[in-house]
Image (tube, rainbow, N blue to C red):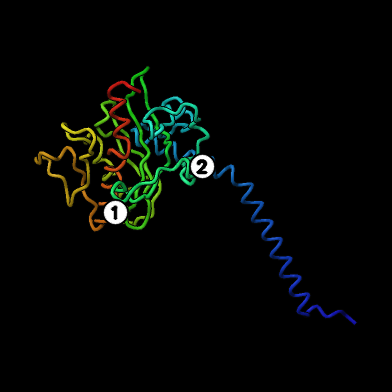
């Protein structure tokens, strides 16, 4: 007489065994693919830094181009000086910001970007000619409508003229706030001035409603708005002004202009 294979216990054994096998396969795949995922993440970051700095990577090896064009250094935002004891190749800002000893908490009055806190140490990137900084690439982030936008903003050596801006991570609405990815909109940033001539501690640059009127005396600081995405547009203005303001990079930029770092 053949054994009855339709018992509850045997069904459970088969189900559990199948789950265990699937879990092992998924875990093995995740572990095996992690190095590739990390490499792709690093490559995407380098690509976005090069794009913000207006360095054309088309048809080129991004890693080689980045290594030959860009210098990375870690900034201590508490002292506004270089923290050369920290290796930018291994420093993990996402991990650091979760460490109370490395996180800078912001008051509600300070928190224009809606981020609550940021890491004390930030990795900055430079394109240099000898000892002269030709382009400074700054990491920036802040709240939009649905998400936190992460990106880079590049400035010319005068530390006032925009070279480029781009976001590499966000979840804003496609066709609305997601227009921050539109090349035509991003092309409106280069050449704009961050600071008013009489105040290099408060960023004057920001998005407006509609299109910029070149005849407007403030046009040098104005960026075309995002149609139908007022809250995302406000978020971009707020995060840029925060990071270029007194609670962001402005004190460091002042020291850099004065040749003190």
Q: Tell me, for residue 140, which label it has, or none.
A: none
Q: In this view, does 203 lie above or below 83?
A: below
Of callouts 1 and 2, the N-terminal one: 2
Q: Residue 40 — which label?
A: 2
Residue under the point 29% across and 51% down: 235
Displayed quadrant of residue 241: top left
Viewer-closest of 183 and 20: 20
Could you tell me which residue is drawn at 41 percent across and 32 percent down? 76
Residue 254 visible somewhere in the drawing? yes
Q: Is residue 187 positioned above or below 132 on the image?
A: below
Provide the residue designation for mark 1. 232
Residue 77 percent location from the top left of the image: 38, 35
Q: Please give left or right for residue 58 compared with residue 180 in the image.
A: right
x and y percentages locating residue 233 in the rendered image: 26, 51
Can you see residue 65?
Answer: no
| Residue appearing at x 61%, y 51% in the figure | 30
**How packed is label 2: few (under 14 Cα within 10 Å), some, or many (20 or more)?**
few
Is 23 situated left or right of 236 in this image? Answer: right
Image quadrant occupied by the C terminus: top left
Q: Which residue is drawn at 10% across and 38% down?
A: 217
Q: What element carries label 2?
A: helix
Q: Quadrant of the N terminus?
A: bottom right
Label 1 secondary element: helix
């Amino acid at each position: 007489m053949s054994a009855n294979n339709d018992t509850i216990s045997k069904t459970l054994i088969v189900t559990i065994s199948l789950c265990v096998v699937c879990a092992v396969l998924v875990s093995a795949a995740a572990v095996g693919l992690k190095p590739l995922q990390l490499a792709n993440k690093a490559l995407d970051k380098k690509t976005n830094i090069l794009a913000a700095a207006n360095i054309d990577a088309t048809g080129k090896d991004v890693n080689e181009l980045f290594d030959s064009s860009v210098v990375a250094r870690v900034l201590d935002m508490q002292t506004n000086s270089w923290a050369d004891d920290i290796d930018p190749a291994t420093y993990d800002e996402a991990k650091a910001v979760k460490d109370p000893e490395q996180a800078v908490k912001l008051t509600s009055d300070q928190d224009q970007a809606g981020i609550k806190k940021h890491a004390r140490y930030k990795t900055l990137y430079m394109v240099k000619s000898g000892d002269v900084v030709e382009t400074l690439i700054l990491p920036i982030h802040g709240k939009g409508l649905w998400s936190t936008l992460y990106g880079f903003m590049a400035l010319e050596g005068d530390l006032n003229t925009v070279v480029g801006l781009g976001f590499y991570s966000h979840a804003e609405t496609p066709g609305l706030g997601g227009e921050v990815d539109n090349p035509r909109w991003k092309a409106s940033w280069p050449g704009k001035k961050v600071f008013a001539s009489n105040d290099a501690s408060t960023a004057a640059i920001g998005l407006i409603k509609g299109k910029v009127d070149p005849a407007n005396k403030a046009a040098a600081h104005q960026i075309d708005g995002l149609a139908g995405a007022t809250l995302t547009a406000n978020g971009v203005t707020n995060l840029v002004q925060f990071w270029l303001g007194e609670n962001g990079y402005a004190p460091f930029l002042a020291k850099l202009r004065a040749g003190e770092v």
